[in-house]
Image (tube, rainbow, N blue to C red):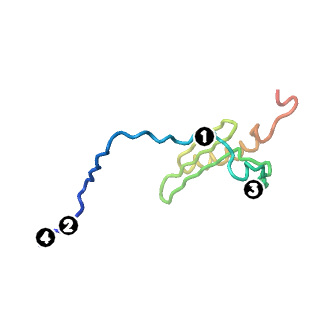
Amino acid sequence: MSAPDRPPLKSITPATDGPRAAVPTPPPAAVGEPKGAARKGDRTAVVPDPHPGDGRRPVAWLHIVAPRGAVPTATSRCACGRDRSAVGHAKVHALITEHNDHREHCPLRNPQEGRAAA
C-alpha cells in the first residue's frame, strides 16, 4: 500500500529578474473625514431616547444571599458612604432593619434645610 501523493509543505518562491521600483500608494484620507451622505450635507435623523428617565436613581442597595442550608450573608450600601455587612441569621435580620431605618434618615434621600442642616 502506498501513501497518496501530497503537495510539498513549503513553497519555494521563484527568483526575480532584478530589482523593481516601488509602487507609490495613494495619499491617506484625512482622519474623521465624512463619507457618503454626510459629505453631501444630508442631515441624519435625531431620534428621542427610547427609554427616557423619570428622574429617579438608585441610592441605597441591600444585597442578601441565603443559599439553602448555608449561612446567610447581607450587604447594605448607600451612595452617602454607608457600607455595612452581616453574616448569620440574627445579624442579617438586624442589618435589614438598619438598612430600612437608614433609608428613612439618609441625607441623600431626605435633604436637610435651614437650621437642621447646620
Which badge, 1 or 3, comes first in the chain's sequence?
A: 3
Amino acid bearing label 1:
Arg
| Cβ–Cβ under 8 Å for marks 2 and 3 | no
Residue on which disc 4 sits: 2
Q: Helix or strand or loop: what does disc 3 sit on?
A: loop
Task: Report the front residue among 48 and 88.
Answer: 48
Vertical placement of residue 82 versus 92, above or below: above
Q: Which residue is mark 2?
A: 5
Distance of mark 2 from mark 4, alpha carbons?
9 Å
Determine crowd level at label 2: few under 14, some 14-19, many 20+ residues with C-alpha closer than 10 A.
Answer: few
Residue at mark 1: 84
Going by the numbered disc 4, the residue's amino acid type is Ser
Q: Quadrant of residue 86?
A: top right
The percent position of residue 16, horizontal first and vertical second, equals: 32, 45
Judging by the rendered image, the residue that carries numbered circle 3 is: 51
> Could you say whether the residue bearing mark 4 is in a helix, strand or loop?
loop
Q: Nearer the viewer, residue 109 or 28?
A: 28
Q: Which mark is residue 107?
A: none
Query: In the picture provided, is 58 more to the left or to the right than 85?
Result: right
| CA separation in Å, label 1 and label 3 | 33 Å
Earlier sequence position, callout 2 versus callout 1: 2
Residue at position x 16%, y 68% in the image: 3
Q: Residue at x 63, y 44 (%)?
A: 76
The image shows residue 39, relative to residue 79, as above or below, that is: below
Q: Where residue 96 appears, x then y in whole percent? A: 64, 48
**As drawn, is 90 to the left or to the right of 110?**
left
Q: Position of residue 100 (x, y in %)?
A: 70, 47
Measured as percent of width and height from the top left, residue 99 is found at 67, 45
Question: Does the residue at mark 1 contact the one at mark 3 (Cβ under 8 Å)?
Answer: no
